[in-house]
Amino acid sequence: MNIIDFDTRIGRQKPNSLLREEACPFCDREHLTDIIAEEDGMILLKNKYNVIVGADQFVLIEGRECQTDMPDYSREKMRHLISFGLHHWQKLLHSGRYEDVLFFKNFGPLSGGTIRHPHMQLVGFPKLDRSCLSLLEYFEGPLIAEKNGVSLRLSQKPRVGFWEINLQTERLHQTESVNTLADFIQLSVDYFMNHFSRRGQSYNIFFYHEGDKKIMVKILPRYATSPLYIGYGIRFRPTSLEEAEKEIKQLYFQDSKE
């Protein structure tokens, strides 16, 4: 079990452009500090509000535009973003400073985030029980598409419940596979935000790794979490997985030979 202190004093200082309509700190690029890397509008920097005690938090600002997000990006921008993020995630993982580094994205008012401006986060933990982070069974499910060593599946055993899309690849160091991973992430977000039966305003993306090569990604829309999960850990699997599988194939892979 991983129980880690959250610094509420720092947390109270964090800006919130989602719920309180405060000025966006990521738009004020001239006053950003502790920048680690910058490339084509993307910026990786240390998180000014390091609320997780004992960990190092980083923010990856996805671009200059605030009122946009992944479904709006060009294919080239999306691929560049995922390549940039994976590079720095792997760099932190192999730095020798951390037991593990978490890489994820919050978007929308129900995602656990506070800033509307599209961004991702990385958190380096010097000590962490990796066995509690994920189970391989969370990534099982019917195959929807496979290309360049990247698979896209609907989750048969959701981590939280209801709808989750899983991606996997063991070809992290091949450009074609990274590009396909980016394409599949983009279409998954687009499906949940623009085509899903309950069009969403919030979602999460979580990256996982098994060893040095195998990468897994989980994308899920966020709504009010089931009380049966919160109170008892009961996870629900939707009975309409087959319908969603057909819809995703029709929307995104109808003309594909993959």
Image (cartoon, helix red, strand yellow):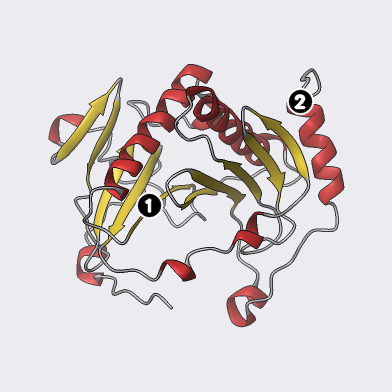
Question: Measured from the top left, where is residue 64 in percent x and y?
Answer: 32, 26
Q: Quadrant location of residue 135?
A: bottom right
Q: Which mark is residue 150?
A: none
Amino acid type, mark 1: Thr
Residue found at x 76% / y 62%:
237
Total number of numbered discs in the rendering: 2
Q: Which mark is residue 114?
A: 1
Circle 2: element type: loop
Q: Quadrant location of residue 5?
A: bottom left
Horizontal relation, residue 57 to residue 73: left or right: left
- Which comes sooner in the sequence, label 1 or label 2? 1
Residue found at x 63% / y 74%:
229
Q: Which residue is mark 2?
A: 253
Q: Quadrant of the C terminus?
A: top right
Residue found at x 45% / y 52%:
211
Horizontal relation, residue 211 to residue 158: left or right: left
Residue found at x 60% / y 81%:
231
Q: Quadrant location of residue 41?
A: top left
Question: Measured from the top left, where is residue 97 in percent x and y?
Answer: 21, 56
Amino acid type, mark 2: Phe
